[in-house]
Image (spheres, rainbow, N blue to C red):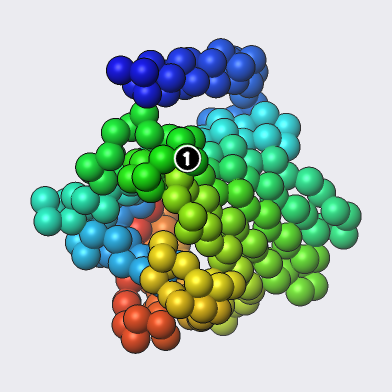
Amino acid sequence: MTKRFSFLSLALLALLMLMPMLTHAQSVSFGADFFNRYIWRGYDFGDSFSVQPGLALSAGNFELGTWGSYSISSDGADANEHDLYATYSIGLGASASLDLTVTDYYFPNSGAEAGEWLNFDGDGDGAHWIELMGAVTLPESFPLTITAAFMAHNDPDNSLYLEGAIPFTVADVELGFTLGLVAGESGFYGVEGASVVNLGLSASKDLQITDNFALPLSAAYVMNPTTEKTYLVFGFSLSP
C-alpha cells in the first residue's frame, strides 16, 4: 500500500509540474509503427509482430512524450513496454545539436509492482528502469550521432551503452549505419565485459499512395555479435 501510494503521489506531482507545458505546447505529434519484430539495441523483445504507438508534445527545445511496444502474440506479452520520456535539445551551432533525455522504461507484465519504481535499495524486481541519455549530432557535412546511455535499476547492475550512427543516401533511399556496444559487464544486456551488441544497416523510403498520402516504409538488417543472432526487420508508420 505504501509503495502504491508513493508511486501515485509522485506521478500526480509530476503531472502538476508539467501542466504548464501541456497547456502551452506548440506542437503535438502522434502515430504508430508496425514491425514484424521489435529489435532494440540488438535484442529481440517479444519474438513477435509489434505495434508501437507514440504521443509527444513539444514547446521550444523541450519535448515530453510517451511510447509503447505491444506484441500481438500472448507468448510475447511479457516484453510489452510503455515508456515516458523528456528531451531537451541544445543547438551547438553549424547545425550540430545535443539532446539530453530521461526515459522511464516500464514493463507492465514483468511481474513486479508498478510502485517499485525508484526503489534503488530494493531487490532488483522493480517494473521500471530509468535511463539517462545524451546524444550529440555533428554538422550536416558529417552528420554522425554519438549516443551515451546509462541504464539504472534497483539492483547493482548499472549499464552504459554507447552508439554511433550515421545516415547517408543511395539513389532516393535513406540509409543508416549503426554500431552499438556495452561498455562493461552487464546483466541487463547479458554481457560479461565490453561487447559489441548492435550492428545494423537500415533503409527507409516513402511509398506514394496518392497525391496527398505517402506511407513511410523501413527495413533494417541487425546483427548482435554477442548473441550470434541476426534479424531482418520490416515495418511501416502511420501518423496524421
Q: Is residue 4 visible?
A: yes
Residue at 81% from the left image edge and 49% from the top image edge: 91
- Mark 1: few/some/many CA within 10 Å (<14, 14-19, 20+): few
Q: Position of residue 98 (x, y in %)?
A: 75, 53
Under circle 1, the secondary element is loop
Q: Would residue 92 appear left or right of 1 to someone viewing this image? A: right
Q: Position of residue 149 (x, y in %)?
A: 59, 58
Q: Quadrant of the C terminus?
A: top left
> Which residue sits furthest right?
93
Q: Nearer the viewer, residue 220 or 98?
A: 98
Q: Position of residue 64 (x, y in %)?
A: 57, 33
Q: Nearer the viewer, residue 209 or 102?
A: 102
> Which residue sits furthest left?
74
Instruction: Provide the residue designation for mark 1.
Output: 121
Q: Is residue 54 visible?
A: no
Quick check: 79 above or below 38?
Answer: above
Q: Position of residue 76 (x, y in %)?
A: 18, 56
Query: How many marks do you count on the picture?
Result: 1
Q: Quadrant of the N terminus?
A: top left
Amino acid type indicated by mark 1: Asp
